[in-house]
Image (cartoon, helix red, strand yellow):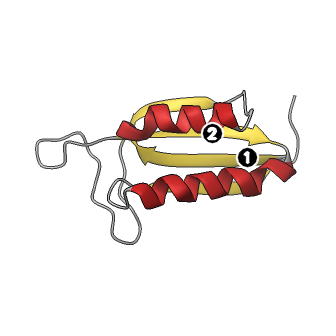
Amino acid sequence: MKAVFIAFNQANTDRVKYMLDRLEIRGYTLWEQVHGRGSRDGEPREGSHTWPEMNSSILTVIEDEKVPELLHVCKKLDNRNLEMGVRAFVWNVEQSI
């Protein structure tokens, strides 16, 4: 099993949920109103007067074989509008209950 953390501009929330539905990824945890800034060239998302936009993030735990396709569709979504930014990070799940 793998954990996949996806951070994205909140304007993409419905698109990310749709993406998970299409890939038959049912379980996830969603955090709204997440502050952050991209490590390369992303604009800050602070919900402030200066930086009004916000991010959301999703964590899902999926079978290893679903990871490549999920990363592929995340990259496609990111390429649709590079200024909005979508990032996905994957790590091993050692145990779960």
Alpha carbons under labels 1 and 2: distance apart: 7 Å
Which residue occupies 49% across, 37% down?
15
**Badge 2, how many Cα within 10 Å: few under 14, some, many 20+?**
some
Tell me the quarter of the image containing the C terminus. top right
- Look at the numbered discs 1 and 2 and tell me whether their residues touch, using CB distance below 8 Å: yes
Which residue occupies 61% across, 30% down?
29
- Total marks shown come to 2
The image position of residue 3, as x and y in percent, is 73, 46
The residue that mark 2 highlights is: 59
Task: Indicate the secondary structure of the residue bearing disc 2.
Answer: strand
Task: Indicate the secondary structure of the residue bearing disc 1.
Answer: strand
Give the mark nearer the N terminus: 1 vs 2.
1
Which residue occupies 54% across, 30% down?
30
The image position of residue 70, as x and y in percent, is 68, 50
Q: Hey, what amino acid is under mark 2?
A: Leu
The answer to which of 42 and 68 lies nearer the viewer is 68
Residue extending farthest to the left is: 49
Q: Is residue 79 left or right of residue 81?
A: right
